[in-house]
Amino acid sequence: MPLIRFSLLLLASIALPLGAQRVAPTAPNVAPMIAGIDAASARYADVARRIWELAEVGYQEEKSSALLQSELRAAGFTVKSGVAGEPTAFVAEYGSGKPVVAILGEYDALPGLSQDSVPVRRPLKAGGAGHGCGHHLFGTGSVAAAIALKRWMQTGGTKGTLRMIGTPAEEGGSGKVFMVRDGVFDDVDAVIAWHPGSGNSVMGESSFANISGKFRFHGQSAHASASPERGRSALDAVESMDVMTNLLREHVPEGTRIHYVITKGGSAPNVVPDDAEVYYYVRHGDMAVVKDVWRRVEDAAKGAAIGTGTTYDVQLIGSVYAFLPNETLARVQQRALEAVGGFELSASERDFAERLQRSEGFSAVPLEATARVHPLTIGRSSPASTDVGDVSWVVPAVQVYTATWVPGTVAHTWQATAAGGTSIGVKGMLVAAKSMAITGATLFSSPSIVAAARAELDAKRGASFRYETVLGDRKPPLDYRVGSVP
Ligand SMILES: [Zn+2]
Ligand SMILES: [Zn+2]
C-alpha cells in the first residue's frame, strides 16, 4: 500500500482519505527506499520485539545493542562498539566525506514497567523493567532508516558519510551527554532522531533541562527500642530533606519540576537505619533555573544532615540541556512525515486500543489520530527532557514523533509498554523509519539545506557559546541502575 501511494505522489500531490494532503519528498528515487523498508518490515518487527522482551535498563543494554549492531554489520556498515566510555554505545558508518549525517537510536528500558502486550495490567516479570518509553522501537526504527538510506546512497552513487549512532541510557543516564562531551558529534553536520508517541508530529518545541543525582546519608545503627539514643537515622535525614524540598516548591520559578524516589530506606524497623538514599531530579526549561534550584536542594541535604546528626554525599547522575529546535530541519522532516503519512488500525488493533483506552488513568482521544499528521508548531516548551538536547546544541538536530502507542497514551506507563509490544508499535516505527530515511536523502541531496541548518544553529546559540556540561569530567554512571531491577 505505501509503495502505491509513493508511486502516485511522485507524479503529483494527491488528496487522500481523512483530509491528509500528501506532499512530494524533495529527494530523488525515494520510492524504492521506502519499498525496501516495507519489504523488511517482518524482520524489523522481530528485532523490536526481541529488544522489547530483553528490556535491558540503562548502560546494561548489552544484548539489545549487540542485536542492532549485527543488523548494521550484515547490511555493510562498519561498526565501532563501545565509545565515550560507554560499553553499549556504538557508531556504525557507511560512505566517506561530507556531509556527515547521523541517525540516533536508543534501546534502554525503564525499571518497574514490565508488561505483557495485553490491554490489562499484567507484568511479564513482577517489578521487572519494561519498554515504557518505546526505545526498543526507537533503536530498531533508526536501524531500518539507516539501512534503507545506505542502499539509496549506494544506488545513486551519493557522496557523504552516513552514521547510525547507538546511544545508551537515555532514561536518566545522560548517555549522549558523555558522547557530546567526548567529541562523538564533532564532525557531524546534521542529526536525525525520532521518538515513539501517541501521534505523528515533528518536534518543533524545546524541552526541559535537568540535573539528577543520588543523596546518600550515613548514620549510626542501633537497636530501635533498646538503645535508640545511640542511633542516628539516615532515613530521618532523607525524610527531613524531602520535607524541605517539598516546602521549596512554593518558592521556585514557575514551571520548575522536582521529583524524587527513596531508593534505600533501611531494612528492618527495629534497626535504626545507618544508610539511606534518595534519588532526585530538578527540571525547568532554563538551565540557569535548574542549576539554582539544584543548589538549594543540596542545601536541604546539608540542613537535613546537620539536624539529624548524619553525614551525606551526593553523586551527580545526569544532566541534559533543553532541546534547541532547528526550524530548517524541522520543515524538511515535516515534509517527509507528511509524504509518508500515518496509518489505519486493523480491526484487532482497534479492539486492543479500545480496551486499553478503558484502563484506569487513561485520557482517551480518537483512534483516528494514528492516521493524521499534526501541523508543525515551533516554539512551545515540553516538560519532558531528553539527552538529544545536548546534541542539538552542537549539531543541527531534528526529532519526529510517530503513533507507536494507542492515542492518549503517555510515556512511562504500562500502557506504553503494552502497545509497544504489538503491531501498533511496529506500524508507528515504520512511519518513523521512512520519514527519517527521506529526511536523510533530502539532506544528502541538498547541501544548501545542511548549510542553512548550521547557520540557524550558529545564530541561535550565539558566537560566544561553548558547550559544557555540569557533569564535568565525570565518567558515565554505568552502575546507576544496578540494583533497581529484580
Ligand atoms: Zn524516551
Ligand atoms: Zn522516557
Image: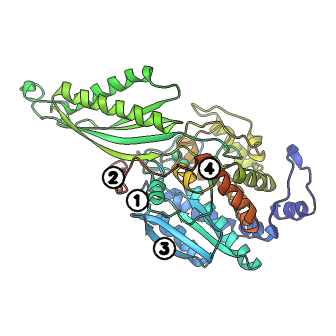
Give the residue type at disc 4: Pro
Q: Percent from the top left, x then y, of residue 235?
A: 23, 31
Mark 3 or 4, which is nearer the eye?
Answer: 3
Report how far apart the C-alphas of labels 4 and 2 lie in the structure. Answer: 26 Å
Residue drawn 40% across the image and 59% down it: 60
- Badge 4 is on which residue? 196
Give the residue type at disc 1: Gln
Total numbered labels placed on residues in the image: 4
Q: Secondary structure at mark 2?
A: loop
Give the mark, 2 or 1, whose residue is nearer the N terminus. Answer: 1
Taking 147 as reference, is 110 left or right? Answer: left
* Marks 3 & 1, CB-CB < 8 Å contact: no
Report how far apart the C-alphas of labels 3 and 4 lie in the structure. Answer: 26 Å
Residue drawn 63% across the image and 70% down it: 162
Q: Percent from the top left, x then y, of residue 138?
A: 59, 56
Number of residues whose C-alpha sits closer than 10 Å to that of mark 3, classed few (under 14), some (14–19) or many (20 or more): few
Number of residues whose C-alpha sits closer than 10 Å to that of mark 1, classed few (under 14), some (14–19) or many (20 or more): many
- Badge 2 is on which residue? 482
Give the residue type at disc 2: Val
Report how far apart the C-alphas of labels 3 and 1 lie in the structure. Answer: 18 Å
Q: Secondary structure at mark 1?
A: loop
- Badge 3 is on which residue? 80
Q: Is residue 470 visible?
A: yes
Q: Secondary structure at mark 3?
A: strand
Please tell me which residue lies in front, 306 or 40: 306
Please tell me which residue lies in front, 183 or 419: 183
